[in-house]
């Protein structure tokens, strides 16, 4: 989603790039240094529009970047489901979903948002860009169509208890969390995970299965991922002028389904450890157990080593054991 498509539908018309950049900096300060005033921007059309210009455009690519990790049965299921975008803001994840699903999408999109200005902004964008797809700013009524509940940076604000209560209310078939990749949110995500498993949901990402998380109770370790996104040229230019890199983004991604048709990958990279002169070292979740994997560089060409050096946490891997060492396993990467 490039900036040029959105500008005609902003609530506020910025007189210049300088005015837009100034508003972006105001919001950034509230998100970082002035947390006590974080919601103040929701009362100003100028700041809501700046949020759309900068954060909506740079958060939208997260959705498609995350989809490449998810199993095909999950992808097929959400494509034919009604979407409930909880804590929708101006419709960031709804737009991302609709862009991915395309004009042939026949379901209904529900944007659930408490801020009046965000709802107004979201409606203006939707009517301008996607009037052919039905969108309601309300929770869905009980019905026969399957439901896909999407939390885009909202579960971390609600907390585990309120998030789970809402899940029970909606009774979705598919759930996807795309949340900040922070240490503080991880324990809340595990509480939600435990509750969903107890209710009969299957973890489809990131865990190999429904067994206990090996990081539960750890004060130093938490499971999160990184997505590298390619931004439209005008959005990339805006991030450069704002001096804020929005290409490599830490996230906490979890996906759940009532049913599953195929198995999850048994091994997933959860942390890239410091690289040595001779090897790549990874922390991998293998069948819900943490393992230190060592991949020797020598067997790989320079181009293959470059690819190995760019693999990020969150990716599934397939390995073959070469040697079981004292504190690690030396493996050969098959995929």
Image: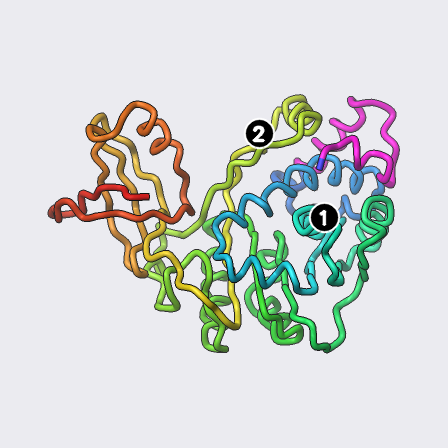
Q: Is residue 200 above or below residue 234?
A: below
Numbered disc 2: secondary structure: loop
How many numbered circles does the render carry?
A: 2
Which of 36 and 146 lies nearest the eye of the viewer? 146
**Start and end of the magenta stretch?**
2-28
Residue 3, visible in the rendered structure:
yes
Residue under label 1, please give it: 95
The nearer-to-camera label among 2 and 1 is 1
Q: Quadrant of the N terminus?
A: top right
**CA neighbours of label 1 inside 10 A, class few (<14), some (14 to 19), many (20+):** many
State the residue at coordinates (81%, 49%): 130
Residue 48 image point, x, y percent? 79, 42
| Residue 6 falls inside the magenta stretch | yes
Q: Is residue 156 above or below residue 22?
A: below
Residue 26 image point, x, y percent? 72, 34
Residue 295 image point, x, y percent? 23, 38
Residue 117, visible in the rendered structure:
no
**CA neighbours of label 2 inside 10 A, class few (<14), some (14 to 19), many (20+):** few
| Residue 24 falls inside the magenta stretch | yes
Ranked by sequence position, the earlier of labels 2 and 1 is: 1
Residue 74 image point, x, y percent? 53, 61
Q: Quadrant of the C terminus?
A: top left
Residue under label 2, please give it: 245
């Amino acid at each position: 989603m490039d900036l040029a498509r959105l500008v005609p539908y902003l609530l506020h018309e910025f007189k210049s790039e300088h005015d837009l950049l100034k508003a972006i900096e105001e919001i950034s300060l509230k998100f970082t240094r002035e947390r006590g005033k974080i919601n103040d921007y929701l009362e100003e059309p100028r700041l809501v529009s700046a949020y759309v210009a900068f954060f909506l455009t740079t958060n939208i690519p997260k959705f498609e970047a995350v989809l490449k990790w998810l199993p095909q049965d999950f992808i097929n299921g959400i494509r034919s489901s009604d979407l409930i975008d909880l804590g929708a803001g101006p419709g960031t994840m709804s737009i991302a979903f609709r862009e991915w699903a395309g004009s042939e999408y026949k379901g209904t999109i529900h944007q659930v948002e408490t801020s009046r200005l965000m709802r107004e902004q979201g409606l203006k964008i939707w009517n301008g860009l996607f009037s052919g797809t039905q969108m309601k700013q309300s929770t869905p009524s009980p019905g026969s169509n399957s439901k896909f509940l999407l939390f885009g940076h909202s579960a971390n604000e609600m907390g585990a208890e309120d998030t789970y209560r809402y899940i029970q209310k909606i009774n979705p078939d598919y759930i996807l969390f795309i949340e900040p990749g922070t240490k503080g949110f991880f324990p809340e995500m595990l509480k939600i995970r435990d509750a969903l498993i107890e209710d009969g949901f299957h973890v489809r990402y990131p865990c190999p299965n429904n067994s206990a998380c090996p990081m539960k109770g750890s004060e130093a370790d938490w499971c999160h991922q990184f997505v590298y996104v390619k931004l439209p040229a005008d959005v990339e230019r805006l991030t450069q002028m704002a001096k804020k890199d929005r290409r490599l983004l830490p996230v906490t991604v979890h996906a759940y389904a009532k049913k599953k048709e195929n198995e999850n990958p048994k091994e997933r990279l959860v942390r890239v450890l410091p690289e040595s002169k001779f090897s790549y070292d990874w922390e991998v979740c293998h069948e819900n157990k943490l393992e230190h994997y060592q991949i020797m560089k020598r067997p790989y060409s320079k181009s293959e080593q470059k690819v190995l050096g760019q693999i990020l946490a969150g990716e599934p891997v397939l390995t073959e054991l070469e040697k079981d060492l004292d504190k690690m396993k030396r493996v050969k990467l098959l995929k």
